[in-house]
Image (cartoon, rainbow, N blue to C red):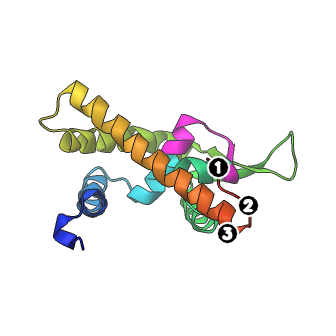
Amino acid sequence: MKKMKDQRQAGFLMAKIRQVGGRISERILKKHDVEINSAQGRIMFALWQKDGVSINELAKKTQLKKSTLTSMLDRLEKMGYIRRQRSKKDRRKILIKRTEKDRTMEKKYVEVSEEMTRLFYKGFSKSEIDRFEKDLERILNNLTEFEANANLMKDGHRPQP
């Protein structure tokens, strides 16, 4: 029987990195007078890539559940960083749009992101960074595929081979 000390540590290390990184990120956000937290920053980052997206699309991009995302969007809207707007093409669809206040804050958030990136990759070469990020994408794809198949099984469908 295998013991825990013989197990790979990727999940444990990623959880620790997220914990420590989150604390440092919050400190740097405060230093730059950015009033949103890192979780809200993930939503804003997705909107900076593409403005005017549906909640469904935003949920996929951020990997947040719709219920979590909706409450975070409520807070961001109250703070003046986003607004909800009905789609002109499909009146049933609500689009999440950026505001002028957000456009001003984006510059500060970019500075925070660059500072965090320097911390993450201190001592790494460009090729090491490229390889590491490719490996992280593979892990994310593995987990996303597993989750999708588990949801299919739960709904009575067979998983994809």
The residue carrying pointer 1 sits among few (fewer than 14), some (14 to 19) or many (20 or more) residues within 10 Å by Cα, namely few
Q: Position of residue 80 (x, y in %)?
A: 57, 55
Gap between marks 2 and 1 measured at Cα: 9 Å
Describe residue 125's horizontal placement relative to residue 152 as left or right.
left
The residue carrying pointer 2 sits among few (fewer than 14), some (14 to 19) or many (20 or more) residues within 10 Å by Cα, namely few
The residue drawn where x is 61% and y is 54% is 59
State which quarter of the image contains the N terminus.
Answer: bottom left
Q: Position of residue 63 (x, y in %)?
A: 53, 54
CB-based contact (under 8 Å), mark 2 and mark 3: no
The tag earlier along the polypeptide, 3 or 1, is: 3
Q: Residue furthest left?
A: 123
- The vertical placement of 93 against 110, above or below, is below
CB-based contact (under 8 Å), mark 3 and mark 1: no
- The vertical placement of 76 against 104, above or below, is below
Three-letter amino acid code at disc 3?
Lys
Look at the image and give the residue range highlighted in magenta.
Answer: 45-56
Q: Position of residue 88 (x, y in %)?
A: 85, 41
Residue of label 1: 160
Three-letter amino acid code at disc 1?
Gln
Q: Position of residue 116 (x, y in %)?
A: 26, 45
The residue drawn where x is 24% and y is 63% is 16
Q: Is residue 35 visible?
A: no
Task: Tell whether position 52 is magenta.
Answer: yes
The residue carrying pointer 3 sits among few (fewer than 14), some (14 to 19) or many (20 or more) residues within 10 Å by Cα, namely few
Q: Is residue 90 visible?
A: yes
Three-letter amino acid code at disc 2?
His
- The part of the image, by quadrant, that contains residue 151 is bottom right
Gap between marks 3 and 1 measured at Cα: 14 Å
Gap between marks 2 and 3 measured at Cα: 7 Å
Depth order, front residue of 63/115: 63
Residue of label 3: 154
Residue of label 2: 157
